[in-house]
Image (cartoon, rainbow, N blue to C red):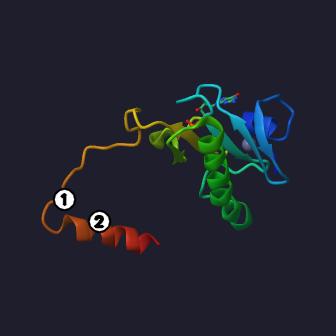
Amino acid sequence: MKEEDCIFCKIANGEIPSTTIYEDDTFRVILDLGPANPGHALILPKEHFRDITEIDADTAAKVLPLAAKIGTALKEGLGCDGFNVVQNNGPAAGQTVFHFHVHIIPRYDADPKMVTWTPGTYEDGEMEKVAEKIRAAL
Ligand code: 5GP
Ligand code: ZN
């Protein structure tokens, strides 16, 4: 299924031009227009899924191997030292385009670390209570 007004549906299916680095029956991989580093790539499924909670099992199973393939190509082709695999779900998590996609971002040793947080703490017993809420929802 494709969505009428979804820009990534149009890009993934070739209706809007993009700088494509890889394509198969399931995915198009393009360069991000606003890259964290040159070569920042986006894996787009050709089918429309809003986010990771909607993606079908067959497509999901193919995403990580493709992320590894693209990341390896970034290292070999661009000489980056590593790469981040980033996938945002929901506005609170930074998702701005609501068609499932995976960022593959070239990273260099001198780069500031990108995915970071200030480690917090739990009060006594809080961790187990939080865990129980999650288990109950699974
Ligand atoms: P999100 O914040 O949803 O995880 O990531 C969306 C990404 O898509 C952003 O990094 C943004 O730069 C990129 N982007 C948005 N529109 C376009 C577009 O039309 N073409 C390309 N190549 N990238 C886009
Ligand atoms: Zn879409």
Residue type at mark 2?
Val
Quadrant in the picture for residue 74: top right
Q: CA distance from mark 2 to mark 1?
A: 10 Å
* SS category of the residue bearing label 2: helix
Near mark 2 (Cα within 10 A), the count class, few <14, some 14-19 or many ≥20, is few
Q: Position of residue 36 (x, y in %)?
A: 52, 30
Closest to the observer, 40 or 97:
40
The residue depicted at 67 percent of the width and 61 percent of the height is 60
Q: Which mark is residue 130?
A: 2
Q: Residue under circle 1?
A: 122
Q: Residue furthest top?
A: 34
* SS category of the residue bearing label 1: loop
Closest to the observer, 63 or 72:
72
Dot 1 beta carbon under 8 Å from ligand 1: no
Vertical relation: 10 (above or below) 24: above
- The quarter of the rendering in which ligand 2 is drawn is top right
131 sits to left or right of 25: left
Asked if the residue at tag 1 contacts the one at tag 2, i.e. Cβ–Cβ closer than 8 Å, the answer is: yes
The residue depicted at 46 percent of the width and 43 percent of the height is 93
75 sits to left or right of 56: left
Residue type at mark 1?
Tyr
Quadrant in the picture for residue 128: bottom left
N-term-proximal mark, 2 vs 1: 1
